Image (cartoon, helix red, strand yellow):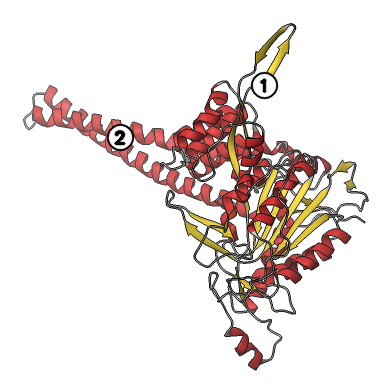
Amino acid sequence: MRITKIADTIKPLALVLAIATLVSCNASTPAKSGGQAKAGEGKAQEGYESLDDLYIVDCLLPGQVRRLGSMSYLSPRRAVRTTTGDCRIRGGEYVEYDRADYRSAMKVWLPQAEQGDAEAQNYVGEIFEKGLGQEPDYLSAASWYRKAADQGYSRAQINLGYMYEKGLGVDKDVTIALNWYRKASGIGDDELILNSEAQKEIAATRDKLNAQLASAKVQTDFLQKQIAGLKTEAEKQTRLAQENRDGVDPKEMEMAQQEIAALNELYEKALVERKALEGQLGSMEVAYRKFSNEDFLAPQVLGQVEDRVMKDINFGRYFALIIGNQDYVFLDKLRSPIQDGKRLQEILEQKYGFSTLFIPNATEKSILNTINDFYEQIGENDNLLIYYAGHGNISRSDQSRTERGYWLPVDAGKENISNWINNSVISDHLDRLRARSVLVISDSCYAGYLGSEKSPFLFGVSGTQSEKAIQAGLARRARVVISSGGVKPVLDGSNKTHSIFASALIESLEQNQDALRDSALFAQLSVNVRKRSQHAEEDQIPEMKPVREAGHEGGTFYFVPVN
């Protein structure tokens, strides 16, 4: 949901009245007689009987009858991720959505993983990482990710890099994480550069390692001096004993030798730690030595071209699903989502050549059914933008310690989450879609829960705006979410103005004249939204996150003007 607030240009008295209309993300109002018309209600795909048919499940398809010469045989069963309806139609076996657990998921994917299938190995890793009703097993997750990553499976390379970045199941190592991200990105060392956030992260890591190394040097130097002093004293006592002088105690000599041995052991351990820290710093220098200090988020001008092609690069077709939920039946109505969506639709169609579908006041069924229909319509070289404006909320699952984010359909109840759209459901559909690049832009409360935990390195490695770098960005799958306010409430607009976030988005797309990558768009949005929210005496900070669970492989979504 979005908090309703009037623009600063309204007169003081009106402003007072407007402030009184501020609402929380889950505030409700009594339903009006007859309810709200559910515009945008989509028709179920042929063969789909209910809304449950649109959920994504792990499906074990039956084997196929094949022929070799005069002999017929049955091929092994195959695992796929698809909708429950599609799985049922094809005679597959699955566990109902939200009832799947560790055992049922493993039954589908483990046999293929053990046979060396990289995709299945990655899914097994994700099952271990998620836990599915039990505690996550990060050690096993990292092990399966490595098997798939070693085969060049980029999604697993991203996942394994993330494990190293966060220290999950493996020793935390930023350099190894970055190297896996680099492998997944497909860009050569000579073009790799880092954005400002990643540079800060690297600088902080270096400072930490340098501090630890300085401490290790002090410790080894101190131990070395102690050992040298004790050895000198022991040698002196030994000479006195050899000269048969008084005052030499054999027990003291034995204790001194034991202490020297103990200090030597401590010294060797400290020296090993010191060399390890020196090695980490050295490997970081090697990994980053070719990186430019330039911030790749800075606009870079490219020549104007037509027909979705630039410098002989085919960016593919562009589609957009725009959802504007405003006239809620049971929750507080919002002011601007529909006009936000309509204006965005105009810009995407007229300036960027998108084929768009706008659903005002969408229900759960219309949203999921439409995304599911895109599976057949959108190909592997196409791009999909999903824009959602409306109420959002959070809830904690009984089987999970993690809070989940939700999109609220127009007929959502205040406390009843039965028809709220779980972010994991959206993520599953994004994973299934064949589109090369999918960008979700969500202007709602708690929209940041759709993405994975922030990682500066998943967006920190990229190329310049050269042809080679753009080709590399298009060669990998992109699954990214830009949220209007992270995991916090956000501001709505008035009935005459757009929301703060939508206004900044519209302005950026209107003013853009060149190929605009997702990260550059976010850089502009982030600055403008922060400034405007401060003027409205609120603190709204957009976020950009990868959706690892949907198969983000380090690719990039580009906006390319038609003319």
Q: Quadrant of residue 534?
A: bottom right
Decide: is 80 above or below 377.
above
The residue tagged 1 is 64
Where does the image place residue 260, in percent across and percent down from the top left? 23, 31
Is label 2 in a helix, a strand or a loop?
A: helix
Position of 61 compared to 244: left or right? right
Decide: is 28 above or below 190.
below
Position of 201 compared to 46: left or right? left
Amino acid tagged 1: Gln
Residue occupying the point 69% across, 79% down: 494
Dot 2 surroundings within 10 Å: few (below 14), some, or many (20 or more)?
Answer: some
Amino acid tagged 2: Leu
Does label 2 or label 1 sit earlier along the sequence? 1
Decide: is 510 above or below 4.
above
Nearest the camera: 233 or 180?
180
Residue occupying the point 90% across, 44% down: 311
Return the mark for residue 217: none
Nearest the camera: 107 or 283?
107
Where does the image place residue 202, in percent across and percent down from the top left? 57, 48
* Quadrant of the frame with the C terminus: bottom right
Residue occupying the point 58% across, 58% down: 448
Where does the image place residue 236, in percent across and percent down from the top left? 19, 30
**Is any part of residue 552 visible from this angle?**
no
Residue occupying the point 53% across, 52% down: 204
Return the mark for residue 266: 2
Q: Nearer the viewer, mark 2 or mark 1?
A: 1
Where does the image place residue 261, in percent across and percent down from the top left? 24, 29
- Count of marks overlaid on the render: 2
Q: Residue furthest bottom?
A: 13
Is label 1 in a helix, a strand or a loop?
A: loop
